[in-house]
Image (cartoon, grey):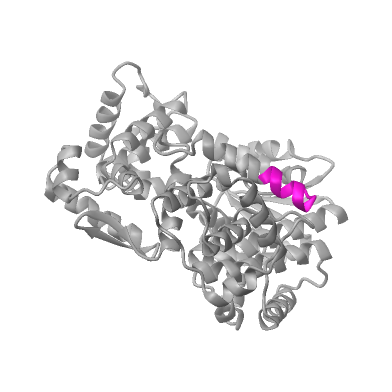
Amino acid sequence: MNHFFIQLIAEKKVRRQIKVLQKIYDAKFPITVDEIAEDLDISKRTLSRDIKDIEHSFPEQEVLELNTVYGYSIDHSHYVDDLIARISEESPLLLIVNGVFQEEFKSIDEWADELFISTSTLHRYLTHLKNILKEFKLELSLTPIAILGKEVNIRHFFFNFFYNMNDISTISHPTEAEHTIHIKVLAEYDEIRKTINYTQYRRALYWIMVVNNRIKQGYFVEIDPELKKVHTKMETYQVLAKVIESLKSMLVVDSLPEDEMVYIDLLTLDIYVYLEDRVISGFHSKAEMDAVDDFLEKAFQTLGIAEVEASDLRVFISYFRNQIILSKLTPLFQKNVYEVNQFIKGGHTALFYKWVDLLQNNPIKQIANIEYIEDVAVNLTMFTHCMAYNKRFKERERHILFSFDGPNAYLNYLATLAEKYNTKNARITLLTNRHATNELVEELQVDVVVCNYKDDTEVLDCEVYKAERVPTEHDWEQIRNIVFMHEIIE
């Protein structure tokens, strides 16, 4: 579920209904009112009203299929997508944010009239928006409604807003002209540098859209003079200057200020993909480079990683150096997508918290201006995870430990299901007489533990997947992905 989108839905009732619909769809099997109410912690009476409202939202088709014995089910995901899309087109906060982006300067009364809601209700919604903007170091003006703060932070908010709304709403997508600019910039850039580009296509497009719109409206960034003085000497900046000159006729202004040129060049660090030897980095002082090297050396020692291949080390160094530079624009570049953080923190808990401790107790925190430690730790966890598995796959087969609880006939059944994943590249062990421990993980050289029980007495130093007590179809799909993950990584 799109967490950023849900945040922008001020109406609790609507947020709840989206969760209800998503819960029924994710179940992959009929689910009862009792089960839904318990999982979402709502009363059955409230849930029944929500289900009726959902059905009224789709009068032309039967969205929820009801089996009187087994419960509700949804056959097609587009029903969930359709409901979210309808909500997004009518959500007051989404419409207001888009209006502010398009420079619609309106008072609270004017917005209330346009949205057909009372001013008191709108005030309540705007309080909700204020809290979201605080996460981006921004404030909300009410006379007229506008977003206030540093331009780099305003652009970051708008980028996150439209980038996250891409798959949900039809409002403000990149134009054909911006698509053309993107294609031409890449072609010119690669032609001059004689390289192949490895950037994120959609992410780049939305940065172009936001930057293009803000410049067209006359809002410009201000870059620290020292950073600008150094960065204008970089090769990437010189290449960008040539590219911009060749595309002058397509720009929204006759010429770009030097600060904007530096800003755009630095944005490439945010959209670059870290793969093997394909890394880029801007300029740093010797103190910054030494701090990164010292931190990583101590970190790998603490993590027990004796040897790091040169290509892996370059990824870590490049990521850290780029974070140092981008954080000089705004620390918001350190932030991750909420869903990624939750997934990694839950799936690689031990490794994640080791990185948190390392970052908390090292001078790199101040030198790199690390404000969002958990987000940075998540990225380092993902880099470490990929590095470790790449190395393990070269050395030996992957070892998956299934630790299941349940009646004897049930365990026999689960054992049969687990064995179907026993391929030449994976070793499968079924554990029934004890729970998994770090001692056992180390003894058996286990890479992944799959369990169907909750045990908080020990955090395992390996990847863990916790299935339902009775593993669902979704659980088995995730387990299959875990077992065969090496095919994706390689």
Q: Residue furthest right?
A: 395
Task: Label the magenta part by its dominant secondary structure.
Answer: helix
Q: Quadrant of the N terminus?
A: top left
At horizontal 35% and vertical 50% (from top left) the residue drawn is 7
At horizontal 59% and vertical 37% (from top left) the residue drawn is 180
At horizontal 46% and vertical 63% (from top left) the residue drawn is 221
Q: Is residue 24 left or right of residue 268?
A: left
Q: Examine the image and state in which quarter residue 52 appears.
A: top left
| Residue 193: x %, y % from top left | 77, 53
At horizontal 77% and vertical 67% (from top left) the residue drawn is 313
| Image: magenta residue range | 186-196
| Residue 87: x %, y % from top left | 32, 35
Front-most of residues 20 and 118: 118
Q: Is residue 195 magenta?
A: yes
| Residue 434: x %, y % from top left | 65, 58
Q: How many marks?
A: 0
Q: Is residue 487 left or right of residue 42?
A: right
Front-most of residues 20 and 86: 86
Q: Is residue 396 above or below residue 283?
A: above
Q: Is residue 467 above or below residue 292?
A: above
Front-most of residues 240 and 140: 240
Q: Is residue 463 above or below residue 64?
A: below
Q: Is residue 255 magenta?
A: no
